[in-house]
Image (cartoon, rainbow, N blue to C red):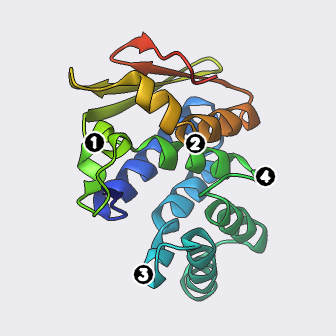
Amino acid sequence: MIGCHGRYHTMFVVDTVEYILQSLSYDARTVELGKIAALLHDIGIIAGRKNHSQKSAALAAVFLDETARVLPKEKDIIINAIYNHSEGESISNAPGAALLIADKIDLSRKRLLPDKTHDDWHKNIMEIENVDITISRNEITINYLTTDKFSAKIFACEGAKYHRIPQRAAIFLDCVCHFQINGEEMKGTT
């Protein structure tokens, strides 16, 4: 299974970025910049999956130059957020941190497409029905709603990237990130 980068994923990420930034009391313009970055974060997929975040940033830069009404400083915020949305090694702004969290937590079956890979990790992800995120004070809780077949052990081990990156982004936002499965704290994600 592979992650689809279509409309569902894009709108999930846009809505989640907006929720994160609003919940943490960022100003309306920062929220808007985050939503722009979320809308454009995967446009580079058209040129292939490899290095798509860098390709997306390059295409977004051209788009922003030609069509958007953003200041150069705002363009830099958007482009940096897009460029770093895959691995999150260089988080430098709140929209980028929110984008990292939103992008990495979207692991529900709604997003997956068939592929030639059928290992336990991907079969396990098929059991995630939905993902909920809640923010209370400076705590971000990500709750994966799953079927009975879901294996938390496989998810905690094989999906470590999908825990470490949101945790790193949450720290940038002065938050702590918790993971749950069906409302129960997930072990092995710290």
Percent x, y for residue 44?
Answer: 50, 77
Q: Observer-nearest residue: 113 or 110?
A: 113
How far apart are the alpha carbons under marks 3 and 1?
A: 26 Å
Q: Determine the CA span between mark 3 and mark 4.
A: 26 Å
Q: Quadrant of residue 25?
A: top right
Is 69 placed left or right of 104 in the picture? Answer: right
The residue that label 2 is drawn on is 161
Q: Looking at the picture, which amino acid does disc 1 mark?
A: Lys
| 165 vs 179: above or below | below
User: Mark 3 — residue?
Assistant: 46
**In the rendering, which numbered label is found on residue 123?**
1
Which numbered disc flags the more N-terminal residue, 3 or 4? Answer: 3
- Picture quarter with the N terminus: bottom left
Q: State the residue position of label 4.
A: 92
In the image, what residue type sits under mark 4? Answer: Ser
* SS for callout 2: helix
Question: Which of pointers 2 and 4 lies earlier in the amino acid sequence?
Answer: 4
The answer to whether 51 appears left or right of 111 in the picture is right
Residue at screen point 38% across, 41% down: 121
How many marks are shown on the rendered structure? Answer: 4
Q: CA distance from mark 2 to mark 3?
A: 24 Å
Q: Nearer the viewer, residue 185 or 80?
A: 185
